[in-house]
Amino acid sequence: MSDVAPEIKVGDSAPDFNLKDQDQKDIKLSDYKGKKNVVLCFYPLDWSPVCQGENKCLTDDFPKFQGANAELFGISCDSFFSHKAWADSLDLKHRLLSDVHRTTAKAYGLYFEPLNCSKRATVIVDKNGKVAYVKVQEIKVAREDKEILAALAKLS
């Protein structure tokens, strides 16, 4: 598939995006440049067991991400309608971005063709818009918040 970029790596400039969150607000990565580190948690699908547990953990640790001067976003190919219902049902504190056209997953090289969704991956974009951390993992394995927070601590 020619429209999928190579998998993103540390040192790359993070591709900008403009996606809607669960409240249909536009979120642009470039709006955070010079202000905050941004943690992008790509995940396959709302309502799936691993994603549910993982997003609950992200919400539980939300104050730690805020304390690290980081903006935290979940990103999947679900619609903002699905995100809204799911975020409300789990009482999520972080925002979920709708990559319904898969353009962001493809720009970051994180598109998973067999399921037509994104891979499970964490990307930290530093205040300069550069990728400071990337971890792509097995689709059925939840991410580890401690690892992400440790990587953020190195940036402050």
Image (tube, grey):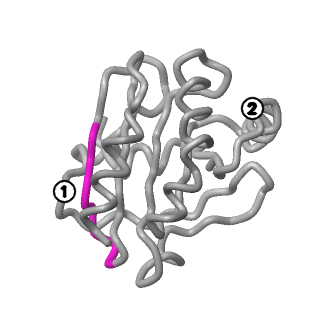
Residue at image coords 58%, 51%: 62
Give the image location of residue 32, x and y in percent: 50, 76
Give the image location of residue 91, x and y in percent: 77, 38
Which element is circle 2 on?
Answer: helix
On screen, residue 112 above or below 140: below
Could one spot residue 100 in this view of the protein? no
> Which three-letter amino acid code belongs to the residue tagged 2?
Leu
On screen, residue 99 above or below 129: above
**Start-end of magenta stretch:** 128-135
Question: Residues at badges 2 and 1 in contact (C-beta under 8 Å)?
Answer: no
Q: Which residue is mark 1?
A: 10
Query: Residue 105 or 86: which is nearer the viewer?
Result: 86
Q: Which residue is mark 2?
A: 90
Give the image location of residue 53, x and y in percent: 57, 24
Q: Quarter of the image containing the C terminus?
A: bottom left
**Magenta run includes residue 57:** no
Q: Is residue 118 left or right of residue 49?
A: left
How many numbered marks does the figure carry?
A: 2
Mark closer to the chain start, 2 or 1? 1
